Image (cartoon, coloured by chain):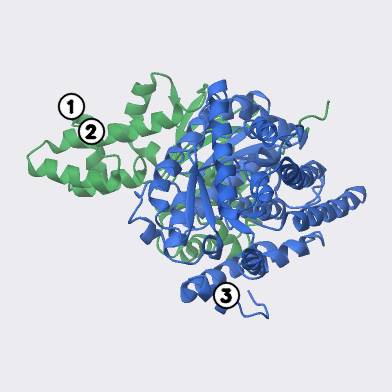
Chain colours: A green, B blue
């Protein structure tokens, strides 16, 4: 059976194709104002027995096309467990949200925390800041990694942080140090979210943010624990969406049944 | 909302802005149709509440206006700590004032900082835009020094209501001193009611008020128990509506309608007839009250296929649990009984407040809930500050908790939907 998982995010849309439960190909494309068109493009010439959608565009897609849906929380749990069977604590830094998902020993979700109301601490924050500092994204990350120090930004809000960064550069503050400070700000927020839950090994870092080598280094240093990175961190949720078709539901006993 | 009677002259006489009021009614009617009337398999008994909602600014207001003409006073309240019993004893009609929707926010923000809870901004907005016939029809509006937000907002609000305004002082603790504060507040309230109404509150009239209020609460307790069945015989949205109408309908008629509804639910339970399949995920909501027409979160929850089977909320079991013991032969003794009962309401304005998490867990266990969703208005300090402890205690009791912070706007609906869907996926297993 061929199953396609779609993770319809705001910045990017991801497609993963499973054949007989194994990933045979995947693709990441930029999102647009018209998610349906982007998805149609992604799916054209890609036959499948089932399509499963996750991400913020999942309901829009399912209303207009034939697809099942599940939330990105469940999707990232299924995807991460597939890649790291002992995964227990997931950190997903995406384009417009950051989430922490806690799994029990059997891989079931027991808790999750999200920041999806505010761009600060997400991929969007770093993109805005890279532009404010006149860096292409790859250079922004590289500069941040090799900076001699960090100049911290005080603003909690992306919009105000952007102003603060522009004023700082106008005063001659070193761009690389600002870049580093901005990455540290994102990591602080991510770690604060993580600390709201009981953190258990293995910790897995996924989402587009895990492609950022500076974020990776800072997170590992800050947590001072082993953090695992899937080889393709950005497609973990799309993978999980496709896997959900065959995911076995745990037999559920209702609480109090033994009363 | 369509009805045959033209209430516009009545609304004009109450000083309402007719154009804005029409807009409000239009939105309300649309929302009601979309959320309530579209539900499947509703108990017939909900027909009464559909009717009440269709006449929410019509027939009920006319009843209040007629009551005033007949010499009664109409008293508006915002909080379950204000005893309806005393209002009834003074030949009055007690109505809860809504504050469940954004309206007139720009006007409200002339007086209130932006980071004020939505409930407070709502009653300011409704009053300033002149779209609330309840406030307009009140002889007396009563505030209470519960949370900081309300306490300070009332300092301004008193100047904005058309008629009389009074604030009841509330204790922060359930100590002897706290008890004395509440008793004095109730004595002051009783005196004010007598002055306004010209009636004298006697032991007999107060006992009668206590019995009316107790009967209303008993009916709601019965409804709460019936929701423990699986499959759930009534939706959370419908039960919430009954809890909301509790505050402003005629008490005897309301009590009778709820009991009739409960009779029908008992039959449904025997026939194993539910609004969701047996085994559908069951959720209890705990937290800030959802005043009418705040239906946002419950409709999101129930759109996932889950059913809400209880509320640890003032508009819910926190407000209706416990009756007043009508033992005593003097007004003062009966007021002591009121204080006994009202001090058991475990609202977050009290410190310490250990029974609230226990109650939330108990409600969840009795209703065999699969999860608790803690609902908190943004900027509501008391409930925000209690949330972490409640979450810990309820989860320690074996029930997963999801915390939601939100306001009345529609802007975060998709984010809430994702969280709620993920929680339902989690508790389904």
Circle 2 chain = A
Q: Do the residues labelled 2 and 1 touch (CB within 8 Å)?
A: yes
Compute the Cα span from label 1 to label 3.
Answer: 71 Å
* Residue closest to the eye, B302 or A229: B302
Q: Is A98 on the left-hand or right-hand side of A253?
A: left
Tally of numbered tags = 3
User: Are tags 1 and 3 found on a single chain?
Assistant: no
The circle on residue A149 is 1
User: Are tags 2 and 3 found on a single chain?
Assistant: no
The circle on residue B253 is none
Residue A147 in view in this figure: yes
User: Are tags 2 and 1 found on a single chain?
Assistant: yes
* Residue closest to the eye, B303 or B220: B220
Instruction: Say if B303 sits above or below A152 in the image.
Output: below
Q: Nearer the viewer, mark 1 or mark 3?
A: 3
Q: Is A198 on the left-hand or right-hand side of B220?
A: left
Query: N-terminal of the two: label 2 or label 1?
Result: 1
The circle on residue A180 is 2
Compute the Cα span from label 2 to label 1.
Answer: 7 Å
What residue is rendered at 18% in x and 43% in y?
Answer: A164
Quadrant where the N terminus of chain B sits is: bottom right
């Amino acid at each position: 059976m061929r199953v396609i998982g779609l993770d319809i995010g705001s910045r990017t849309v991801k497609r993963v194709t499973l054949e007989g439960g194994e990933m045979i190909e995947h693709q990441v494309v930029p999102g647009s104002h018209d998610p349906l068109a982007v998805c149609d493009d992604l799916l054209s010439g890609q036959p499948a027995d089932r399509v499963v959608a996750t991400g913020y565009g999942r309901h829009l897609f399912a209303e207009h096309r034939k697809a099942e849906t599940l939330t990105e929380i469940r999707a990232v749990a299924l995807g991460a467990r597939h890649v790291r069977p002992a995964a227990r604590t997931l950190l997903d830094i995406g384009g417009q949200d950051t989430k922490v998902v806690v799994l029990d020993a059997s891989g079931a979700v027991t808790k999750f925390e999200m920041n999806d109301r505010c761009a600060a601490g997400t991929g969007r924050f770093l993109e805005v800041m890279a532009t404010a500092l006149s860096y292409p994204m790859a250079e922004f990350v590289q500069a941040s990694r090799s900076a001699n120090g960090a100049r911290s930004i005080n603003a909690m809000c992306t919009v105000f942080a952007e102003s603060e960064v522009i004023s700082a550069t106008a005063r001659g503050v070193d761009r690389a140090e600002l870049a580093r400070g901005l990455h540290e700000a994102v990591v602080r927020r991510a770690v604060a979210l993580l600390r709201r839950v009981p953190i258990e090994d293995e910790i897995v870092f996924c989402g587009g943010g895990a492609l950022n080598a500076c974020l990776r280094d800072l997170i590992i240093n800050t947590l001072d624990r082993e953090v695992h990175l899937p080889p393709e961190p950005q497609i973990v949720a799309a993978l999980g969406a496709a896997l959900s078709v065959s995911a076995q539901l745990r037999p559920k006993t209702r609480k109090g049944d033994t009363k | 909302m369509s009805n045959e009677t033209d209430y516009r002259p009545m609304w004009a006489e109450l000083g309402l802005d007719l154009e804005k009021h029409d807009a409000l009614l239009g939105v309300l009617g649309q929302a009601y149709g979309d959320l309530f009337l579209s539900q499947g398999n509703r108990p017939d008994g909900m027909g009464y509440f559909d009717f009440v909602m269709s006449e929410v600014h019509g027939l009920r207001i006319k009843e209040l206006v007629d009551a005033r003409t007949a010499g009664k006073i109409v008293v508006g309240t915002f909080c379950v700590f204000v005893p309806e019993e005393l209002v009834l004893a003074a030949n009055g009609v007690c109505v809860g004032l809504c504050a469940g929707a954004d309206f007139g926010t720009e006007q409200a923000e002339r007086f209130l900082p932006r980071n004020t809870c939505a409930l407070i901004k709502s009653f300011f907005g409704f009053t300033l835009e002149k779209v609330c016939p309840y406030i307009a029809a009140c002889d007396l509006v009563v505030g209470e020094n519960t949370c900081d937000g309300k306490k300070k907002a009332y300092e301004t609000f008193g100047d904005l209501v058309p008629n009389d305004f009074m604030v009841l002082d509330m204790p922060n603790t359930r100590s002897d001193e706290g008890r004395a504060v509440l008793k004095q507040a109730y004595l002051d309230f009783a005196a004010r009611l007598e002055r306004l109404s010209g009636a004298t509150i006697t032991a007999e009239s107060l006992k009668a008020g206590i019995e009316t209020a107790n009967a209303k609460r008993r009916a709601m307790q019965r409804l709460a128990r019936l929701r423990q069945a699986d499959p759930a015989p009534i939706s959370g949205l419908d039960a919430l509506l009954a809890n909301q109408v509790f505050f402003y309908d005629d008490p005897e008629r309301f009590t009778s309608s709820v009991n009739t509804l409960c009779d029908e639910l008992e039959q449904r339970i025997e026939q194993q007839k539910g609004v969701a399949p047996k085994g559908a995920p069951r959720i209890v909501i705990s937290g800030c009250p959802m005043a009418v027409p705040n239906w946002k979160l419950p409709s999101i929850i129930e759109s996932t296929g889950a059913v809400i089977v209880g509320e640890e909320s003032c508009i819910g079991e926190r407000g209706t649990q416990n009756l007043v013991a009508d033992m005593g032969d003097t007004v003062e003794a009966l007021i002591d009984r009121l204080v006994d009962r009202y001090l058991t309401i475990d609202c977050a304005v009290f410190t310490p407040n250990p029974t609230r998490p226990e109650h939330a867990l108990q409600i969840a266990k009795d209703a065999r809930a699969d999860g608790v969703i803690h609902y908190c208005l943004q900027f509501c300090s008391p409930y925000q500050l209690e949330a972490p402890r409640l979450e810990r205690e309820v989860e320690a009791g074996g029930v997963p908790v999801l915390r939601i912070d939100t306001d009345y706007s529609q802007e975060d609906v998709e984010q809430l939907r994702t969280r709620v869907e993920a929680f339902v996926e989690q508790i389904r297993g």
